[in-house]
Image: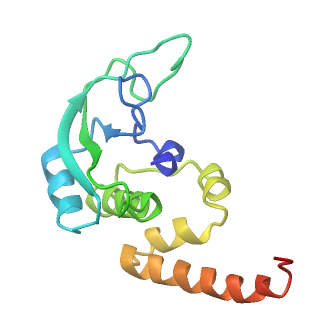
Amino acid sequence: MCLVERTNVSEGRGTSSPFETIGAPFVNGELFARELNGAHLPGVAFEPIRFTPTADRRTAPRPKHSGVVCSGVFVRVVDRESYDAIRAGIFVLSTLRRLYPGDFKWSVPRIDRLAGTRKLREKIDAGVSPEAIMRDADNEIDRFSLLRRKYLLY
């Protein structure tokens, strides 16, 4: 869920469960959870939640939406073996962008640095499905794996 950190959506800093709590004042937690659960991602369930990020000098000096009630989801990993954090993160970002196009904002170029490329942001903005984004990424990983094979010593 660290990809959420480079958007205007709270990644849960300033709560008791950072990176498991995702939301913003403009998010409808019930709708967001229903959409994410409808994707049937393996190993994870999304529960609607309301939370208020609170500043803490040591752990969260400037959390997004500090002191403001937010709605969103709690990310509950139910099977660590089948959970794919990258896939879940892409679904979360795509769903936020689709449901809240006027409110959801990227922190550019920071999201591109964090993702390692601008392609993720551009594809989500263009409405490319999370499934297609993951297929493209899997294909790139396969090509890289073949390329690197000749350089492996062991």
Q: Is residue 52 above or below residue 47?
A: above
Q: Is residue 124 above or below residue 99?
A: below
Q: Is residue 12 left or right of residue 116?
A: left
Identify the residue at image location x=28%, y=65%.
Answer: 42
Q: Tell me where residue 72 sits by quadrant.
A: top left
In this rendered view, identify the residue nearer to me: 72 or 97: 72
Identify the residue at image location x=83%, y=79%.
Answer: 152
The reply to whether residue 129 is in sight is no
Identify the residue at image location x=63%, y=53%.
Answer: 114
Q: Tell me where residue 66 sits by quadrant.
A: top left
Residue 120 at what x, y percent from top left? 54, 68
Q: Is residue 118 above or below residue 15?
A: below
The reply to whether residue 73 is in sight is yes
Residue 79 at what x, y percent from top left? 30, 55
Residue 92 at what x, y percent from top left? 35, 57
In this rendered view, identify the residue nearer to me: 25 or 134: 134
